[in-house]
Amino acid sequence: MSNQSKPVYLKLRDMIAAAIIDGRYREEEMLPSVRALAAEQGANPLTVAKAYQQFQADGLVEVQRGVGMYVARGAAETLRKRERETFLKQEWPEIRGRMKRLGIAPEELIERT
Amino acid sequence: MSNQSKPVYLKLRDMIAAAIIDGRYREEEMLPSVRALAAEQGANPLTVAKAYQQFQADGLVEVQRGVGMYVARGAAETLRKRERETFLKQEWPEIRGRMKRLGIAPEELIERT
DNA sequence: TATAGTGCATCAGTGCCATAATACAGCGCG
DNA sequence: CGCGCTGTATTATGGCACTGATGCACTATA
């Protein structure tokens, strides 16, 4: 429902964001080149570039022309804070309302870890 | 993040589903005509028709040409069961993973009702 | 029969997404 | 310098989803 018909560049954006937050792409380190990630994911380089573009616009990723892109300092923390906020203020209320409508008690979900 | 750029006919579909589950559109009763709901929601009649179409394909809504559409018997229960299943098996695992990544404990969410 | 209300099929327009083929600009290194 | 790697800009194209305007078939009612 949430990950099937979504545009490719948005899926890539989410993947990259998750990798940064999880530390798989570490700060101050280079991240895969546009062409490399495109080949790895079977996508078009331009599509990957479009995904990266969202991050450099926010200052989470910095560019050195002719060299590559690296994760900015504090990017992981910034990302986590931001996503955490949007989750709490936007997504969770909808999810909670949905659960109420469907008659799902929160307690039965926590057990499953 | 989840309700801004979503297609209109999908928003309408969710609205209608919620109305059926909540009993605001009762079983065996007529539901608003395509044109009426379109006028009420400021949408195009065809867009509303497309939303309705999803339900009649599943047998949750039945059509009488020239008369209108009514909610099938047991539609509310069927809908709730189905949505409940897809929520538990598809949506919740993703949400849970997201919460873990963002460092959100489930307990702090339950308090808020 | 006449009218007004249904849903529905057809055709067309629009915009986003993804891809492709180039070309260009900056950097590191031998 | 020359080569190879970076990211980026440009233009064009095909596909697809969404939306819309119009007209038709059907039904209930007077």
Image (tube, coloured by chain):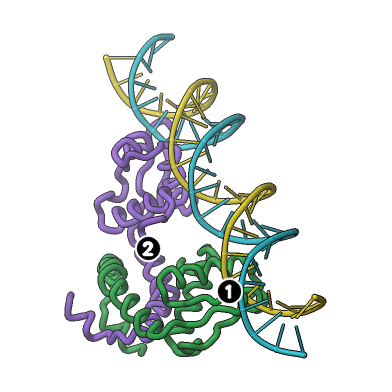
Chain colours: A purple, B green, C yellow, D cyan
Going 26% across and 77% down the picture, which residue do you hit?
Answer: B105
Q: Residue at x 41, y 48 (%)?
A: A8
Observer-nearest of A111 and C7: C7
Q: Please name the residue shown 43% across and 70% down the image.
A: A86
Q: Indicate the quadrant where residue A18 lies.
A: bottom left
Disc 1 target residue: B65
Q: Which residue is mark 2?
A: A2
Mark 1 secondary-structure assignment: loop
Percent position (x, y) of residue B87?
A: 31, 73
Mark 1 or 2, closer to the camera: 1
Say which of C30 and A21 sits in front.
A21
Distance of label 1 from label 2 (alpha carbons): 35 Å
Q: Chain of mark 2?
A: A
Residue A17, x across and y down, in percent: 35, 55
Q: Position of residue B82 (x, y in %)?
A: 32, 76
Q: For the C terminus of chain B, give its image quadrant.
A: bottom left
